[in-house]
Amino acid sequence: MVDLKGQYAAIKNVVDSSIQEIIDNTSFVNGPKVHEFQKNLEDYLDVKHVIPCANGTDALQIAMMGLGLEQGDEVITADFTFAATVEVIALLKLTPVLVDVNPDDFNISIEAIKKAITPKTKAIVPVHLFGQCANMEAIMQIAEEHNLYVIEDNAQAIGANYKYSNGTKAKAGAIGHVASTSFFPSKNLGCYGDGGAIFTNDDALAHTIRGIVNHGMYERYHHDVVGVNSRLDSIQAAVLDAKLPKLDSYNNARRNAARKYSAALAGVPQITTPKTVNNCEGICDTCDCHVFHQYTLKIQNADRDALVKHLNDNGIPCGVYYPIPLHLQKAYKDERYNESDFPVTNQLVKQVISLPMHTELDDEQIEFITTTIKNFLA
Ligand SMILES: *Cc1c(COP(=O)(O)O)cnc(C)c1O
């Protein structure tokens, strides 16, 4: 699904020498590289504060802790996503409210959010799934009307732009009150282990969060709030700092691959190729609106699972993200939910298939993958 070796070869000199420097200086934790990367990411995203942390799940949890959400507060998020988002809501004893998504972009449905708001709702967590932003303009408007926080889960869309209806753009993760991301190796900006970060433009919230990631300390050995220990280590920061200047070209390579997949699969009746939304049409580089963390097809009137098996049998890895709606997961079942609330998610879990997607895909691989799919469906 991903090829990280080719990417490493191109940055080996920079990565190896910065890692060696960290070992020579023994600046393993909170070293200068962490600070450098943080500054460079703030500039790249045009966001006032980046707070590095240990992983993307921590980032989400810490963002929610920083906002002071309390037991019983309702937090609305998408039913069709990775479990981390709902997991931290539940861990903090907040009440997750899962809602349905859109059939075209797989992102949280605005209508479903509106329906789910109650007097207890405190926050919305849009997940920018597969590399494209949720409808942030509508979400921010709902949040303003109902006095809610918006926490962007940006683990899958770093580097993507969001295009407003007036044509202006902002980077994914720089729009809500706070955002989280993951630097897991397979993400668009991945390190060589675990890593994550929180972003915000709010000075007071950034201050609160900097204490939370460090055991609730704002002054050494004074623990003002209950915190956690969540750090990005210097070696991971060095890898990320070497990759950040290449992130746009990495995302371009993903878009190129996506464009070739879509061209090769156009006109296959059982296939719906990914759609770009939010005032952006097609897979264009000028907008940068989709960074294709995953290239996800919908398969209709064919046996999706048999196609997965056929691809695997031909040596082609592929993924089903996600095979089970969160509202049907044992850990997150809740009698408040009705199946009729999730028609789209319940369909998508049966239809989706994600093809290999990374910066090193070449024409020959794309040709082989798409031909194998077409032969199966013919
Ligand atoms: C990867 C991911 C996370 C979790 O990130 P980790 O670094 O693995 O903890 C959270 N949300 C989404 C949508 C993700 O894709």
Image (cartoon, helix red, strand yellow):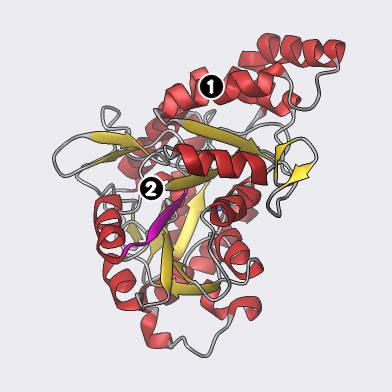
Task: State left or right for residue 229 relative to residue 282.
Answer: right
> As rendered, which of 315 and 284 lies closer to the eye?
284
Q: For the point 24% across and 57% down, which residue is it?
A: 141
Q: For the point 48% across and 26% down, which residue is it?
A: 42
Q: Position of residue 294 (x, y in %)?
A: 48, 47
Q: Is residue 286 magenta?
A: no
Q: For the point 53% across and 63% down, which residue is it?
A: 69
> As rendered, which of 22 and 322 lies closer to the eye?
22
Q: Earlier in the sequence, mark 1 or mark 2?
A: 1
The stretch of residues the image draws in magenta is: 147-154
Q: Position of residue 251 (x, y in %)?
A: 44, 30
Q: Secondary structure at mark 2?
A: loop
**From this viewpoint, which residue is outermost toward the left?**
166
Residue 142 occupies which quadrant of the picture? bottom left
Q: Secondary structure at mark 1?
A: helix
Disc 2 under 8 Å from ligand 1? The reply is no
Residue to which mark 2 is pinned = 176
Q: Is residue 51 visible?
A: yes
Residue to which mark 1 is pinned = 39
